[in-house]
Image (tube, rainbow, N blue to C red):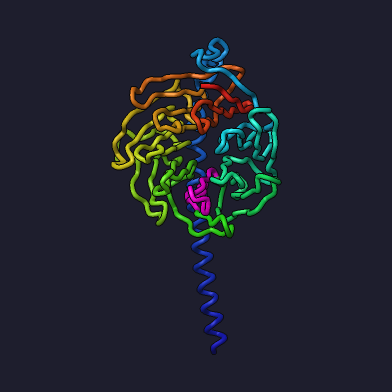
Amino acid sequence: MKRFLLFAILFVTFFFWGTWLTAQDADLATEKNAETEQILAENKAATATAAAAEKENEAEIILTPRAKLLKRLEGCGSPVNSVTFSADGHFLLAACGGPGNDHSARIWNIATGKSVQIFSGHTDRVNQAVYTPDGKRILTASDDKTVRVWNVEDGKEIFKLAEHLDEVKCVAVHPSGKTAVSGSRDCTFTRWNLETGKATGMKRAHKSTVTTITYSKDAKFIVTGSRDRTVRLFNAESAQWITEFGGKTTEEGHRGSVLSVAISPDSRMILSGSMDTTVRLWETKTGIQLLCTWQTIKQPIYSVTFSPDGKKILAGSGDFAARIWDIKTGEEELRIRGDGMQSVLSAAFSPDGKTIATGSRDKIVRIWNY
């Protein structure tokens, strides 16, 4: 009798567990189909003026004489999806992935222009690569559904973090360097213990893919962006949702997928870039006040970031340009274009704010002075 009861309990448990997983898979499949249709529609709109942008690119090399190409860092066999400087500004880390089948991350010595480390092991495109605060490790997020932790010195894999159910689009490291968060096409972000390589929690964050994620410098907030067109703010310690930017809270929200977010050094402002060709600046405290909007010539904004002093913003876009705006005046201060550069998928300020890195669809990282 006891055996029968045990068997019955196990059967019911596995039945409901299987039913739940099936429901989860069905929901995810429905969301993925809807998302695919959305992406196709957005891509069609985004490429409508690409030929005009390319023609303009040939004529206009650099908008301002203050910008000068300092270095071309080559070696990626696929588009450059993310770029970030080391803390001392001497090295540049990039994530490669997409057409070309190079699924790696690379570090270059900026002074020599030579590649000094390659991190290979992912089986699909690498969407983002970031340093830990001590510069001794890097984390990579990939469409192969994993986040990987690597040793910078020897390029070897330390941990393979594999809890997501779908492609991992983004990753960020806590300012302490002890934990990290990653966002996925499964609509969640997962928190990781970087000392053990174990997941410490998973949060359903959006109604569609979590495309971008970051911590505030004071470690109080996590900011996410999604293909559901919203930006959301979470408590970094508890992972509790705080507020939403755009969406139903205001009519001034994005009209396309949010592809990149950043939070200002003082945590008072949030920046978002979208497929709808706009860069939007939000006040963190209220979550609904739109401070400013900038727009390109009908091309997606792939990357946004604040300058180290928090006074300027940098955006990379599909019209083959990187732009800097002054937050106080709202004026475009600099536009960089030329050297055959294609869509700017990623852009970053150096730690001293004097140089800019751009990662392009043409598989090249460029360093510009500013």
Quadrant housing the N terminus: bottom right
* Count of residue discs: 0
For the point 46% across and 43% down, which residue is it?
Answer: 214
For the point 53% across and 20% down, which residue is it?
Answer: 50
Q: Nearer the viewer, residue 305 or 18?
A: 305
Does any portion of residue 274 appear in the rendered image?
no
Does any portion of residue 332 appear in the rendered image?
yes
Q: In this view, does 202 lie above or below 42?
A: below
Give, as a single range, the part of the protein colored magenta: 169-190
Find residue 332 and report its horizontal and vertical position in percent: 41, 20
Find residue 291 and report its horizontal and vertical position in percent: 31, 31
Q: Of all residues shown, which one is farthest toward the top? A: 59
Find residue 292 and report its horizontal and vertical position in percent: 33, 28
Residue 310 falls in image quadrant: top left
Find residue 297 and report its horizontal and vertical position in percent: 45, 20
Position of 338 with respect to 226 (left or right) is right
Position of 262 with respect to 103 (left or right) is left
Residue 186 in the magenta stretch? The answer is yes
Q: Of all residues shown, which one is farthest toward the bottom? A: 1
Residue 257 in the magenta stretch? The answer is no
For the point 55% across and 25% down, which residue is it?
Answer: 343
For the point 39% across and 40% down, which residue is it?
Answer: 230
Position of 169 with respect to 257 (left or right) is right
